[in-house]
Amino acid sequence: MNLAGKVAVLGAGLLGASFARAVKEYGVADRVCMWSRGESTRAKGRALCGVFDEVFDTPQEAVKDADLVILCTPTEHIPVLAKEIAGSLKRGAVVTDVGSVKRNICKKCSEIINPTGAVFVGSHPMAGSEKIGLEYSDASLFKGRPCFVTPYSEIEAEAAGLLRKIWTDIGMRVHFSTPAEHDAIVARVSHLPHLLAGLLCINASNFDKDDLKKYAGPGFRDTTRVASGSPAIWDSIIADNRVEILHALKSYAANFNEMLEAIEQSDFKLIGEMLRKAKDFRDELQKTL
Amino acid sequence: MNLAGKVAVLGAGLLGASFARAVKEYGVADRVCMWSRGESTRAKGRALCGVFDEVFDTPQEAVKDADLVILCTPTEHIPVLAKEIAGSLKRGAVVTDVGSVKRNICKKCSEIINPTGAVFVGSHPMAGSEKIGLEYSDASLFKGRPCFVTPYSEIEAEAAGLLRKIWTDIGMRVHFSTPAEHDAIVARVSHLPHLLAGLLCINASNFDKDDLKKYAGPGFRDTTRVASGSPAIWDSIIADNRVEILHALKSYAANFNEMLEAIEQSDFKLIGEMLRKAKDFRDELQKTL
């Protein structure tokens, strides 16, 4: 049995289009409709065989009669889009998003959507790629990856349950948390590694003696892969999650300074303990793959 | 035509055993002999089909008549091992190593080996894996990876030329540099990313609210992969390359503090510029794969 009759995907980048493919592949819904702000994306969407049943020119048309609406635009547009569609939603429709910061989005969208008789519950599927755009969409993008579902208040419990089923059906490991807990967690497991990978590239590009790119082995490549992501998304991530990102950066700086001092003083015992702790954590992480 | 008649591999961990496999697969030498300090490693080496023609119980026996000797032990044992074999080397033999720090090793080993009529030239093949040990050896480990060859003085030019041919034959992109330049470069492209990956794991493991492992997506996994490496090798890396590692850490700290301040002040223009610079570097790096 389908979990949702009609799904509306608003915004068809990598995540939105991959979600549409997954919904089709795993039989989560009968129909998948799409709207995207860019005319060329809509044209590409129409040309994709068997992914979107219909592509609309306005978000209001796309969400009409939809049981599930998923907002896959850049984070800063999500509350704006929620306002645009609020009057067109079916009563009882579930609206979610894929934004990587949740506190701000969930508060605003719940306030906009819930009074209409539809329900908003945030999601954050932690899947992606440094390749962006509908061209790279892939039904298996979500497989084995973690996904947050972040109900903002108790009235959203039923909708959260439906979202848990849908994300699980397309292969994700679903975790419930409050929007605030989510933001503290992703600051440490997502935003911090992205910023550090970028800083490592900046450091290498500033090295004045030689072009370091030709010497970069697999370790450097892996450690910096995410620095290839689009810088455009960071304005809204930092605007929305500045406090938790600063907490994460400052606790990281404390670890960094402890290591720097240990190396300065050739304190091999402390260096060894720190690297052992890191290895234990990473080895355990590997087992959760 | 073979580049070397007989190769002696001393120390048969992942790198030594993979080198032996590659030498066989690409026809670089007629015979590959092996010695390893651990009796169990020697036994495993004897059991590996078609990799080692002979496994010896002493390094002196293994290097007898060898045209190329490659020292694949942990870094701190390399000069010790050089002393042990110096009296048994064939005149004109080329001795190299795979240590990840070169200034100290090249100075010591050239002083030990060159007066015997053999020639030492350091190598650093930047290939590896977080999996260690002969069990994981793989002839294709070196393919497409960078390899430093670091002659210490002009008299080593001919030996360096032979090493360039051999590493190129098994698939590596060879770069010549002085041992000192090498150490400055690897502090930034290898040692720094390893330490930062470790610090990111330490930071995550210190998070007191939850176990962050279950939320780690592909970005966190890639960024921290190298933290799974053996902590045991770091004593000698830091002992040998402390000054350059401290330079690298301090220049990184300057970039880090600039980013931290930009986020504190919501200076989106500067944040965007920094992340754009990082992305440009990483995108260019991707093209060199």
Image (cartoon, coloured by chain):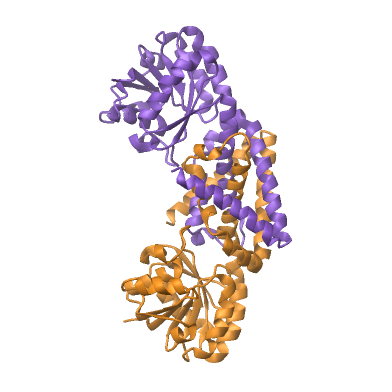
Chain colours: A purple, B orange
Q: Is residue B147 left or right of residue B211?
A: left
Q: Is residue B24 visible?
A: yes
User: Observer-nearest residue: B269 or B68?
Assistant: B68
Q: Position of residue B159 (x, y in %)?
A: 48, 82
Residue B174 versus residue B271 in the image, above or below: below
Residue at 56% from the left image edge and 38% from the top image edge: B211
Q: Position of residue B170 (x, y in %)?
A: 38, 70
Quarter of the picture holding the N terminus of chain B = bottom left
Q: How many numbered circles does the render carry?
A: 0
Quadrant assignment, res A266 = bottom right
Residue at 39% from the left image edge and 70% from the top image edge: B44
Q: Position of residue B236 (x, y in %)?
A: 62, 67
Q: Is residue B199 left or right of residue A119?
A: right
Furthest-left residue in view? A49
User: Observer-nearest residue: A195 or B232?
Assistant: B232
Quadrant assignment, res A133 = top left
Quarter of the picture holding the C terminus of chain B = bottom left
Residue at 41% from the left image edge and 70% from the top image edge: B17
Residue B211 versus residue B162 in the image, above or below: above
User: Observer-nearest residue: B128 or B169?
Assistant: B128
Residue A153 versus residue B193 in the image, above or below: above
Residue at 69% from the left image edge and 55% from the top image edge: A260
Q: Is residue A243 left or right of residue B120?
A: right
Q: Position of residue B135 (x, y in %)?
A: 40, 64
